[in-house]
Amino acid sequence: MAIKFVTKKEVKKRKKVKPHYLLVYNYMIGDADGNTTEEVTVSLDNPYVEKYCKLLNKLNPTKGYWGVSLDQDRLKDHLKAKQITKNDFEFLSKLMFENYEEDDTDDDFAYEFYDGVRSETEYSFLTFEGVDLYYVNEYGQKLETKFTK
């Protein structure tokens, strides 16, 4: 397998895009029948992105379940298990399940998250395995991100 390096000249030829975040939801299909992802575009100035990613990535299976499922009833289980606070629950519910007011100016960015939230496919359930956040620069290059303290 040969590795091809992109030259500066090739990068400059690419059509420029508006820089943004790419949020990737990682799922296991059924009981390990495979993996799938859902991707959503998130604005760079979205004030919710860091908190949202951190909260989702800290969810662990609750009592009686071997995995995490992104549905509203199961999110309540994470609240009961004290993995998240009541404020965290309301925050996640707003962003994951469209529980926001369309005319509320504080929620201009809430709609960017929910398209990636899944708990099942047409043929099986999905187990949530975390999110990854990438920065996509003006040349369309996808770069890894890390949150600092």
Image: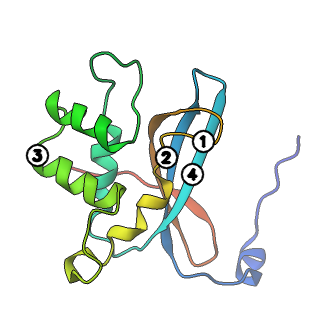
According to the picture, the residue beneath numbered tag 2 turns out to be: 118
Disc 4 residue type (three-letter): Glu
Estimate how packed mark 2 is, as few (under 14), some (14 to 19) or many (20 or more) residues with alpha carbons within 10 Å: many
Provide the secondary structure element on which disc 4 rests.
strand
Give the mark, 4 or 3, whose residue is nearer the N terminus: 4
Q: How is the image coloured?
A: rainbow
**Distance (Cα) linking label 4 and label 1:** 11 Å
Provide the secondary structure element on which disc 2 rests.
loop
According to the picture, the residue beneath numbered tag 1 turns out to be: 121
**Distance (Cα) linking label 2 and label 4:** 8 Å
According to the picture, the residue beneath numbered tag 3 turns out to be: 86
Q: Quadrant of residue 142?
A: bottom right
Estimate how packed mark 4 is, as few (under 14), some (14 to 19) or many (20 or more) residues with alpha carbons within 10 Å: some
**Distance (Cα) linking label 4 and label 3:** 27 Å
Whether residue 51 can be seen here: no
**Closer to the eye: label 4 or 1:** 1
Disc 2 residue type (three-letter): Arg
Q: Residue 45, labelled with which disc? A: none
According to the picture, the residue beneath numbered tag 4 turns out to be: 38
For the residues bearing labels 2 and 1, Cβ distance under 8 angstroms: yes
